[in-house]
Image (tube, rainbow, N blue to C red):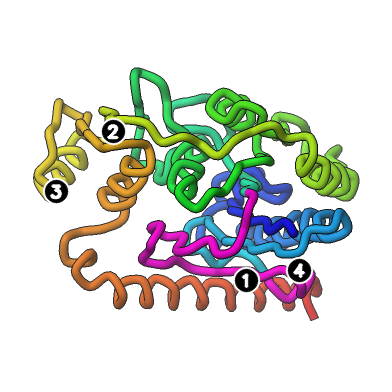
């Protein structure tokens, strides 16, 4: 029986139409969390109707606490917050065969909606002069577990980038250049669910093959930050660019997590650091529930 592992982000979801909607503890974010949850619910129900036996959802935006599990089919497992490993942030994907990436965004330095790679502090992540997206990083990090990426949703630019690095993947675009007032969210969600279910048979993608070594340029928007990070981790730097050499794309993902989110002290105290970060996430989601209940959108 088929098991699906879903990585869920918010920028490409139906309720995020501005940077504020992706930002922690903003009123727009509470609405975006509800919409993101309902997007996942539509996909989950479509997958179970197609005969999928297992669905695991990893909330993977900012704090990792954006989804309201009580509104998603109870047959699905919703995992909130972050894990130390074995895949940084994600942990162990468990007994799954296929990978879906929902609500994603385009790579730093490109024209997509709220485009960034891991953090908006980066102007670009380049390998052979080409921007690297989170789709490429995440699928590489999960490749050792045999997860075949079959479905991707996000803005048109993000979808094009996913198709370029993951041949055969099925994509479903959401163009946020249209007017939000004319956007039929119910119809869009039905189409999203159908597309995800159809991808189980329509996708011709394969598990990414990890090759290397690779040399990447991590370009910071602020040269002082590049200088600080290079000194912190003893890395090669050329002005605002850090030069990263790794065995493969999965290795690049691990290095990026380290330089974007950690310090040597936080890394040494990683179990405590993650517990504190997840506590912040849980408090934020409690705030979301309060706001939605106050507005009559949750009981």
166 versus 261 height, above or below: above
Label 3 SS: helix
**With 92 as the anchor, is 188 left or right in this view?**
right
Kindly identify the residue that appears in the image at 88 percent across and 48 percent down.
190
Magenta part of the chain:
69-98
- Relative placement, left or right, of 283 versus 227 is right
The CA span between labels 2 and 3 is 13 Å
Going from N to C along the chain, the mark reached first, 2 or 4, is 4
Residue at image point 28% right, 33% down? 218
Report the mark closest to the observer, 3 or 1. 3
Asked whether residue 146 appears in the rendered view, the answer is yes
Relative vertical location of residue 88 with respect to residue 124 in this rendering, above or below: below
Q: For the residue labelled by badge 1, is the local secondary structure a helix, a strand or a loop?
A: helix
Could you tell which of marks 3 and 4 lies nearer the N-terminus?
A: 4
Q: Distance between the residues labelled 4 and 1?
A: 16 Å
Rendering coords of residue 287 (x, y %)? 58, 75
Query: Residue 72: which disc?
Result: 4
The residue identified by callout 2 is 218
Q: Upstream in the sequence, badge 4 or badge 1?
A: 4
* Tag shown at residue 214: none
Q: Which mark is residue 233?
A: 3
């Amino acid at each position: 029986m088929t098991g699906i592992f879903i990585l869920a982000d918010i920028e490409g979801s139906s309720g995020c139409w501005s940077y504020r909607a992706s930002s922690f503890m903003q009123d727009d974010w509470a609405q975006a969390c509800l919409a993101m949850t309902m997007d996942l619910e539509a996909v989950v129900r479509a997958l179970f109707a197609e005969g999928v036996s297992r669905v695991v959802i990893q909330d993977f935006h900012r704090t990792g606490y954006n989804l309201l599990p009580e509104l998603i089919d109870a047959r699905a497992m919703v995992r909130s917050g972050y894990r130390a490993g074995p895949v940084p942030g994600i942990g162990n994907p468990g007994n799954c065969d296929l990978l879906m990436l929902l609500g994603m965004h385009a790579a730093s330095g490109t024209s997509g909606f709220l485009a960034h790679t891991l953090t908006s502090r980066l102007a670009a992540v380049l390998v052979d002069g080409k921007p690297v997206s989170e789709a490429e990083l995440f699928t590489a990090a999960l490749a050792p577990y045999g997860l075949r990426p079959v479905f991707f949703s996000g803005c048109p630019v993000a979808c094009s980038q996913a198709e370029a690095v993951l041949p055969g993947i099925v994509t479903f675009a959401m163009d946020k250049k249209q007017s939000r007032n004319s956007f039929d969210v119910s119809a869009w969600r039905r189409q999203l669910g159908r597309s995800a279910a159809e991808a189980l048979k329509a996708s011709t993608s394969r598990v990414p093959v990890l090759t290397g070594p690779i040399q990447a340029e991590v370009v910071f928007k602020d040269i002082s930050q590049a200088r600080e990070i290079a000194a912190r981790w003893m890395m090669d730097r050329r002005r605002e660019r850090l030069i990263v050499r790794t065995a493969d794309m999965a290795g690049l993902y691990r290095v990026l997590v380290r330089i974007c989110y950690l310090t040597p002290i936080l890394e040494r105290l990683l179990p405590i650091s993650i517990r504190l970060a997840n506590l912040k996430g849980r408090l934020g989601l409690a705030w979301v529930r309060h706001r939605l209940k106050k507005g009559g959108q949750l009981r």
